[in-house]
Image (cartoon, rainbow, N blue to C red):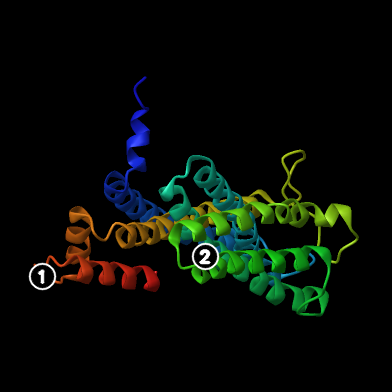
Amino acid sequence: MAAHPLFRYAAPQAFYPLAGQVARIAGWAAAVLTAIGLFIGFGIAPTDAQQGEAYRIIFVHVPAAWMSMFIYLVMAGWAAVGLVFNARLAFTIARALAPTGALMTFLALWTGALWGRPTWGTWWVWDARLTSELMLLFLYLGFLALHGAIEDARRADRAAALLALVGVVNVPIIYFSVVWWNTLHQGASVSLTRAPSMAMTMLAGMLVMALAFWMYTVAVTLRRARLMVLAREAHAPWAQQEALALTGAGGCPAASHTGATARAMETRA
């Protein structure tokens, strides 16, 4: 039976150019959507009757919180694919997602603190929603730290993937914490089972910003994955040519030089 045409992109040499094209499109989409979302949120959406202008932080806070959970589920999904099929590219994508997931989690926590000070009168409380979101940040950082602590790349991939799968249990805890426990954090304003409890312009601004954050995630993840692929395939002729083209290193064909260059680029990513 012939393999599905999409499976050919699991090969690093086929994935690399495709990832570059998709990352470029996603990057431009993220920039345009961010501009539109911020314009809706800060220029069109009405002032909240109870919170005044302070509520506008939700146009960054809520999409970042959504993405922090969604990215973790996607990361764990790729980690599971890597474990089941022993697919190195799946492990690579999972690892490339982790820094952006950590960024979104930190952004959600930081903007939540900025929102909480005028709304609740405090920067931080140890309630279920905030504590479980902080645990999510530790899971992202732990994933990256565990992978970096193991020298053998294949063992590091498997160990970090197992940690990612174990950490999935925290995602529903974050989402349902305001239902399961009496928390200071307000309940969900957007639900699939009932009408939104906010003006449509507010909802539109949040959804556009959420899509912008996802496009940003796709763009930076694929660019980071490309550098990781170059580092792992440093001795392949095509990877040497791509690495030399990226760094403008001229015509030096030495694999050792190219491998060091690719690893350096991966570290910076």
**Dot 1: within a 10 Å radius of its alpha carbon, few (fewer than 14), some, or many (20 or more) residues?**
few
Quadrant of residue 40 within the rendered picture: bottom right
Q: What SS does tag 2 mark?
A: helix
Q: Work out whether residue 36 can be spotted.
A: no
Residue 232 drawn at (x, y percent) = 34, 59
Q: Residue at x 45, y 63 (%)?
A: 152
The residue indicated by pointer 1 is 250
Q: Amino acid at mark 2?
A: His
The residue indicated by pointer 2 is 147
> Is residue 79 shown left or right of residue 235?
right
Q: Amino acid at mark 1?
A: Gly
> Is residue 252 shown left or right of residue 14?
left
Q: Residue at x 28, y 44 (%)?
A: 14
Residue 39 drawn at (x, y percent) = 51, 62
Q: Residue at x 50, y 67 (%)?
A: 150
The residues bearing labels 1 and 2 have C-alpha atoms spaced at a distance of 33 Å
In this rendered view, identify the residue nearer to me: 61 or 125: 125
> Is residue 5 shown left or right of residue 203?
left
In this rendered view, identify the residue nearer to me: 202 or 244: 244
**Dot 2: within a 10 Å radius of its alpha carbon, few (fewer than 14), some, or many (20 or more) residues?**
many
Q: Work out whether residue 184 can be spotted.
A: yes
Q: Quadrant of the N terminus?
A: top left
Q: What SS does tag 1 mark?
A: loop
Q: Which mark is residue 163?
A: none
Residue 225 drawn at (x, y percent) = 39, 57
In this rendered view, identify the residue nearer to me: 40 or 183: 183
